[in-house]
Amino acid sequence: YALYPMPLRHGLTIGEMARFYNDVLGIKANLHVVPMSGWRRDMWFDDAGLPWVRPSPNLPNLTSALLYPSLVAFESSNLSVGRGTTEAFQRIGAPWLNADSVVRLLEDRGLNGVRFSSERFTPENPGDRKYGGRSIPGVRMTVLNRDRLSVGRVGAALLWAIARVHGDSLKLTDRGFDLRFGEATARQALLAGEDPDAVMDRTLPASIAFQQRAKKYMLYR
């Protein structure tokens, strides 16, 4: 949903993004951002010693927020992303999912900073109305090293693995998925079985170009 092409995990604060948009989009508002004190760009939220306040009802903790970019595109699918559980966006599942087979494919990829495991979970009154009150098989993501974790690669690997095991059962709303995931060509390549790392590698030049352009709007080092 970005107003300007940017990585799903862009690394800017709201104030920095406002500075970026105000200039790049030619808004020319009389904008003044008050910088935070004591914040460094290498800090995680829990390094600040502040209490967690949910930015959304289904982001109960920092881990869910961290993994959110990996799973948000699957809201436009017939998979549950754990809404209606205490750990939304840390798991994904559906009644038809062969979680063990999907986990084997994912674990074989050796993705940095994350472990995949099979489980069952029961969404209770989920806001997305997916499988409420039903115990369903799922894949759980456990963050082992958040500094090495690539949430984009996790999301790409999930789509690739689930499509490989369940090409006929997996249903996507293409436009909604593409808006969240970034582009149709990546989705199409992963559904066709292309290596997810190769798909993500093609996005690196655009990501690096954005990071270079965004530097002048950053308030923290």
Image: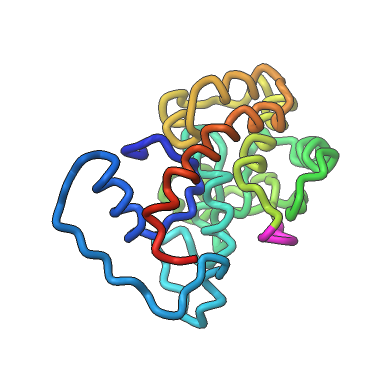
Give the vertical position of 166 relative to 132 (above or below). Answer: above
Horizontal side, residue 167 vs residue 22: left or right:
right
Is the magenta region chiefly helix, strand or loop?
loop
The colour scheme of the drawn protein is: rainbow
Q: Which residue: 68% across, 46% down? A: 138
Residue 146 within the segment the image draws in magenta:
yes
Give the vertical position of 70 relative to 96 (above or below). Answer: below
Give the vertical position of 45 relative to 159 (above or below). Answer: below
Q: Which residue: 64% across, 38% down? A: 95
Residue 134 within the segment the image draws in magenta:
no
Q: Position of residue 23 (x, y in %)?
A: 26, 46
| Residue 99, quarter of the rendered image | top right
Q: How many marks?
A: 0
Q: Which residue: 66% across, 33% down? A: 96
Q: Position of residue 190 (x, y in %)?
A: 65, 24
| Residue 129, quarter of the rendered image | top left
Q: Position of residue 27 (x, y in %)?
A: 18, 44
* Residue at the extreme bottom of the image, as rendered: 49
Q: Quadrant of the N terminus?
A: top left
Camera-side residue: 188 or 128?
Answer: 188
Horizontal side, residue 42 vs residue 103: left or right:
left
The magenta-colored residue range is: 142-147
* Residue at the extreme left of the image, as rendered: 30
Give the vertical position of 177 relative to 143 (above or below). Answer: above
Camera-side residue: 142 or 210?
Answer: 210
Q: Position of residue 53 (x, y in %)?
A: 41, 72
Q: Which residue: 51% across, 82% down? A: 49
Camera-side residue: 109 or 74?
Answer: 109
